[in-house]
Amino acid sequence: MAAQTDKARRGLHIRWTDIFVNLLLLAIGLLIALPVFIAIFTSFKLPTQIVTFPPTVFPKEWTYENYITAWNINPFGRFLLNSTIQSGIITLGQVLFSVMAAYAFAVLEFPGRNALFYLVIGSLMIPFELVFIPNYQLISALGWGDTYMGLTAPFLVSAFGVFLLRQFFLTVPKDFHDAARIDGCGNWRYLWTVLVPLSKGSIGAFAIFAFLSAWNQYLWPLIITSSVDMRTLQIGIRYFMSTLDRGADWGPVMAGAVIAILPALAVFLIAQKQLVRGIAMTGLKG
Amino acid sequence: MTGDRKSSCWRKAGTNVIFLSELTMSQSTLEEPLGARQPVKTQSNWTRRIWPTLEGYLYLAPTLLGLLIFVFIPIITSFRLSLNRIAPFGNQMRFVGLDNYVDLLTSADYWDSVRVTLIFVLGTVPTGIALAVALAILLSYPLGRMAWFYRALIFVPVIISSAVTGVLFRWLYHPVVGYLNYWLVQLGLAESMQQAPNWLGSKEWALLAVIIATTWRQLGFNVIVALAGVQNIDETFYDAAKVDGAGIWQRIRHITLPLLSPTLFFLLIINIIYSFQAFGEIHILTQGGPGRATTTLVYNIFNTAFVGTPQRGIASAQAYMLAIMVILMSFINYATANRRVHYQ
């Protein structure tokens, strides 16, 4: 009886809390996403509307003029291509090599395995700031400055990926491997026809990380590219924005920012679940 | 290896029962010296020892090679660099021992960037974590179908790059037509646009401006981790507390927060590391200025190594000092990782 009245009272009570929490989250959510919305709306405003006071969030008239201007002033097509090639190569390299190394650490048995694993994990602790000057000098000495090789070479392998995928490979019963071996299935084939299909989820989550962190890279592309034609989107926007002081408009700059956000946003909306689960599981950004 | 056997591994996982029976069979035959299926003689040293080792190293080769070239050797190169200095004329490096380190520790500019970095870390980390936990608790409320929508809005900074963050906030901070100052005036927090903070142009506000932008970008990640922590807490704790008549605040205070402490500790360490390394926003928003108001340690390294006359020796010494702090943080993080997992 007592429980029932309690439940009934709570039912009514919760409805108000429901509304309150929902409204609160909506307000906070919009506030957090606001800088992104403002960028999107600003990019669709007429140049005259952008610098009016007081500033308005929504465009009075929608125009895609800024995108055309941005595209004409800057080789955004080229930036987009560069970013895609750079992130694509890095993602491919990291996934392929991490799968291989994770397989060796999780499944194969050979002397020195554990020591090497600790070495790989240990490298996760080394901040990029410690190694980026020697890396810059090496890449320059190799003549790879301002090339795709230079943009991608230091990031083709990922200790984080090795760690993440090894964790997953360890959960696959070892019997699968033994049985496959007895059946005459070599390691290479077992890896790609049995283990990788079984680990699609984890590999996918890691690929998303690898892609996003490569796409968003800043410091390295900034120092290693020198010609306009080799800039990635992130660096392209930075230089585009620095022309603002010389009288350029904010509209095209915002259009450029939106172009840089869109691919990452698409990945986020399509693969939100994997991305979130990946971050939550490992607590690491790629 | 006959063709028949090769094709059998395409059968994949579903048939593992058959595999297992085969496994036990062949193992037992192996134990008999003259087993019919697998003659022991063919188990040469090559198949038993050398090939498996070699194979293991072949799988590891790309990763080890990459880490060797781009991480392990540079650790040493970097240290060697830090013991040298470029001679005033020409490009010759000159060995100077620990002079670079001594100079740093006695340089007012260096200590100023230590101070800026500490303020930056203190400004971004506690606020970021507190916001993340509050949002995670709100998001753990049963929201039904709307949950994904709120999450998408709140998680979205996680995909925004430091460069784009810089661009977005430079627009928000615009001194004449900026949204932020306009809203501050509307809310009565500033008297007029003229008297509102000159976010990026004044020494007093620039560091705060950079802190706000960085906190924003980190928030998505922090909420995701905090939410995972909140959702990991066993429901029965709350049920028990409800039976005992604990209200919502008491439940947060005495159940959520204590049980979340491993997550909080993890967030603390990882956020300190990220804050130490923040670069993109600063480079786009203030370029370390005005004056040296936003020149953090990382920004200082970049400045020394790549702006004006590159002084890579001194920059490497700075990098080493920073790295020691970051490595220490990482070490604490790894050392406590196990405790974190088994806390509840």
Image (cartoon, rainbow, N blue to C red):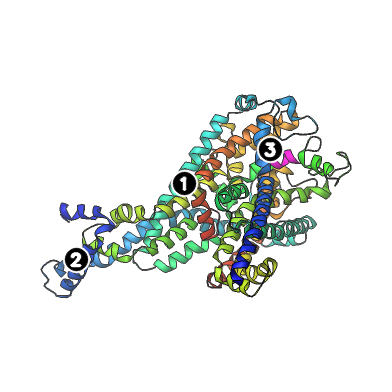
Q: Nearer the viewer, mark 1 or mark 2?
A: 2
Q: Are marks 2 and 3 on the same chain?
A: no
Picture layout, residue B185 above or below residue A129: above
- Label 1: few (<14), some (14–19) or many (≥20) C-alpha neighbours in 10 Å: many
Picture layout, residue B139 above or below residue B167: below
Q: Label 1, on which residue?
A: A91
**Residue A148, position as x, y percentages in the image:** 50, 39
Marks 2 and 3, how far apart in space?
64 Å
**What amino acid is at disc 1?**
Thr
Q: Residue at x 65, y 58 (%)?
A: A12
Secondary structure predominantly adopted by residues drawn in magenta: helix
- Local SS, label 3: helix
Marks 1 and 3, how far apart in space?
31 Å
**What amino acid is at disc 2?**
Glu
The magenta span reads B167-173
- Sequence order check: which comes first, mark 1 or mark 3? 3
**Residue A111, position as x, y percentages in the image:** 36, 68
* Quarter of the image with the N terminus of chain A in it: bottom right
Q: Residue at x 61, y 58 (%)?
A: B141
Q: Label 2, on which residue?
A: B22
- Local SS, label 1: helix
Q: Label 3, on which residue?
A: A38
Labelled pair 1, 2 in contact (Cβ < 8 Å): no
